[in-house]
Amino acid sequence: MKSLIIALGMLVTGTLLYSQQQKTPNFIIFIADDVSWNDLGCYGNSQVKTPNIDRLAARSIRFTNTYLTASSCSPSRNSIITGRYPHNTGAAELHTEPPIDMKSMPEVLREHGYFTAQSGKFHMGAYAERGFDVIYRKGEEIGNGGEMSWLKSVVERPKSKPFFMWFAALDAHRDWGPNQFSGTHNPEEISTPFYLADGPETKIDLAKYYDEITRFDHHIGEVMNELKKQNVLDNTCVIIMADNGRPFPHSKTRVNDRGMKTPFLIYWPEKIKEPQVSNSLISSIDIAPTLLSLASIEIPDFIQGVSFEKIIENPALPFRKLVFSEHNWHDYEAFERMVRSERFLYIYNGRPMQPQLGPADAVGSPSHAELNALKAGNQLSAIQSDLFATPRPVEELYHLDTDSLQLVNVASHPGYREDLMEMRGILSTWQAQTADTEPELLTPDWYTKEPGYVKTSMHGIRGEMPGHKLQAVKNNHKGPF
């Protein structure tokens, strides 16, 4: 009799636990490496082949105004996973790490009973390792594209816990390597964007880039099939996004839409039954508090972002009035800040004598070489020539109602004086509230502005980190939003 009672008790307890687990959502973030917001089929790019993502988009919320806080890999990823602005993580520059006592959103989930796994590109620092039960990041584990252990993570997870998985592709980061999807896109069928040269080498460059996006898409499809097989797909909230813009001139490291805007899809069969579109402004620092809120976990004070759970329930609702981004050192000296409202995008550039060629991998690209050739022949268009312009304007203002591509800087137009002053004031307030500072001695250029990663005499030297003087790493103010 005693054995029977114990057995019944265990059965009831197990049933209750199972029921509770079913109510606790699972989370997966698929994060592409260097993919622009409009380089997926569901965002209107008819040239790139992303059948799995497009199929998911048919039952997703597709966000049209989601902005990263940095168009640079490690600052962007650290910002997403902590819910903090780059200068508030203490790692505002590429290849820098937050302090070891920094806390991440996966660590909070893990403390509340989640199984957490990271597979693929890491690039965040030792502090972030505490947040994961399992980490796959070695070359033989993750493969050339970084996706080989995604399926393994899902198959081998403990089935008794809700899970959070950070699946970070190396696709589509340069250099392009041969893979099973090489040749998927025909260069002769590629049309180039207006800011690049319409030449054969650029078309080949784009075709190889699209091939790697297709590989990213393929592995997403494999994971989704496994989730369905395990009967956990309905209760899994899936996010598809990128860390920064495409690694081409005019995109990666820029603080306009071509650099800072990310594709952002949320697929969650239990909550989202039909395709929907949200035009609300979202910042990537809002992802961490949103997932914690969906998991019914109190949002810690260190998170500067704001939960957009209500947008998942009703995508038509307004959310943020403002998003902010920053560009700090990424191969070359830089200090830029951006604020975007519904109607305007404002940029402050503290280093106007630096041309905005993009990162060193873009400078060494065939696409850059063809723009250089046009420059030598005085054949650049106005937007193409912007790549090489020095000095650059200290301030830029774009009226998004009439200039969604951000081509015409109206900062000097007298008709926009009040708008300029308002946006300048908003940025100044955000910098003051979040303890952002502009150091006199920033990290200098590590490479010359020519192809081949040619090192300068200053290579390896770090300057002062933005926010360091005011201990921004200890500042939790959200700033205006």
Image (cartoon, rainbow, N blue to C red):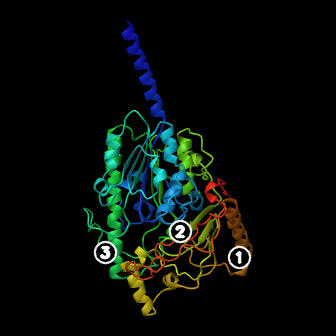
Q: Residue at x 48, y 34 (%)?
A: 23
The residue at the far right in this view is 418
Q: Residue at x 73, y 72 (%)?
A: 421
Q: Alpha carbon of mark 3 to alpha carbon of mark 2: how far?
A: 25 Å
How many numbered marks, from 0 up? 3
Of pointers 1 and 3, the one earlier in the residue sequence: 3
Q: Amino acid at mark 2?
A: Asp
- Residue occupied by mark 2: 257
Q: Compared with residue 82, is residue 95 higher up or lower down, i.e. above or below?
A: below
The residue at the far bottom in this view is 377
Asked which secondary structure carries label 3, the reply is helix
Q: Amino acid at mark 1?
A: Tyr
Tag nearer the camera, 3 or 2: 2
Q: Compared with residue 253, is residue 300 higher up or lower down, i.e. above or below?
A: above
Examine the rendering and report whether any part of residue 239 can be seen. Answer: yes
Residue 293 got which mark? none
Q: Amino acid at mark 3?
A: Pro
Q: Are marks 3 and 2 in contact (CB under 8 Å)?
A: no
Neighbourhood count class around disc 2 (C-alpha, 10 Å): few under 14, some 14–19, many 20 upward: many
**Residue 341: x, y in percent?**
64, 64
**Residue 98: x, y in percent?**
53, 57
Q: Alpha carbon of mark 1 to alpha carbon of mark 3: how far?
A: 42 Å
Q: Residue at x 52, y 66 (%)?
A: 93
User: Is 322 left or right of 116, judged from the image as shown?
Assistant: right
- Residue occupied by mark 3: 187
Q: Can you say which quadrant of the picture contains the C terminus?
A: bottom right
Q: Residue at x 51, y 62 (%)?
A: 75
User: Is 217 left or right of 417, judged from the image as shown?
Assistant: left
Q: Nearer the viewer, residue 221 or 103?
A: 103
